[in-house]
């Protein structure tokens, strides 16, 4: 099921062992290479600095918050060597510029993610101020339209451009009769 990004912020983190709230999941950690939500930056009740809660350590995501076994599921960022590069980037999707090779489309105003695999599926792009006067619609970009993600922008495929033969060649070569 798709959920909106607002359902990922400021969530209580509840320990099943103690039955208490042990942290607050403040914002999601997103891998820009594949748009997978890895977990959350958390403010733990017992620690002054930020902790990380990985998706795989969440027993259940409920309307009341995120249920974990116990507080040991909250990791120090330095302990997560496998995710070190992504944690250092602190990638943010909201307000990221979106463009095609020919046009600036606007900025990401929201996104939807799959609540089972935690992959970002759709980007909602608000048009730039100049385009707002001509159109009030929000663009919806599917993850399959994304060509490149950088620190400063997201490049997406033009929807009005037909695919060239070189783009179709790998797909044609893959078809066997």
Image: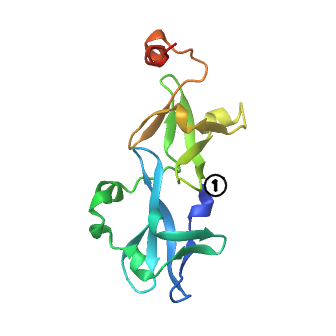
Location of mark 1 (residue):
4
Residue toward you, 29 or 108: 29
x and y percent of residue 139 in the render? 65, 36
Q: Is residue 168 above or below residue 62?
A: above
Q: Is residue 115 above or below residue 80?
A: above
Residue toward you, 130 or 16: 16
x and y percent of residue 6 in the render? 61, 60
Residue toward you, 71 or 51: 71
x and y percent of residue 5 in the render? 59, 56
For the residue labelled by badge 1, is the local secondary structure a helix, a strand or a loop?
Answer: strand
Residue 122 appearing in the image: yes
Query: In the figure, residue 54 lies in which quadrant?
Result: bottom left
Residue in the image at 53% along x and 71% along y: 59
Q: Residues within 10 Å of mark 1 (few under 14, many from 20)?
A: some
Residue in the image at 47% along x and 10% along y: 165
Colour scheme shown: rainbow
Residue in the image at 45% along x and 64% along y: 56
55 on left or right of 115: left
| In the image, farthest residue toward the top | 165
x and y percent of residue 117 in the render? 53, 53
| In the image, farthest residue toward the front | 177
What is the number of callouts on the image?
1
Query: In the figure, residue 149 lies in which quadrant?
Result: top left
Residue 40 appearing in the image: no
Q: Is residue 71 above or below residue 155?
A: below
């Amino acid at each position: 099921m798709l959920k909106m990004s607002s359902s990922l912020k400021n969530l209580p983190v509840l320990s099943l062992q103690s039955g208490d709230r042990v942290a607050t999941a403040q914002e999601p950690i997103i891998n820009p290479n594949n748009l997978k939500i890895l977990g959350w930056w958390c403010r733990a009740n017992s620690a002054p600095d930020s902790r990380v809660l990985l998706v795989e350590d969440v027993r259940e995501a409920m309307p009341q918050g995120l249920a974990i076994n116990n507080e040991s599921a909250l990791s120090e960022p330095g302990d997560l060597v496998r995710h070190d590069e992504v944690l250092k980037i602190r990638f943010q999707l909201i307000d990221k510029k979106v463009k095609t090779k020919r046009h600036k489309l606007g900025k990401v105003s929201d996104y939807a993610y799959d609540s089972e695999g935690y992959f970002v599926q759709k980007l909602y792009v608000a048009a730039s101020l100049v385009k707002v006067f001509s159109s009030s619609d929000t663009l919806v970009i599917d993850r399959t339209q994304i060509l490149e993600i950088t620190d400063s922008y997201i490049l997406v495929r033009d929807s009005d451009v037909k695919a060239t033969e070189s783009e179709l060649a790998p797909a044609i070569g893959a078809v066997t009769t």
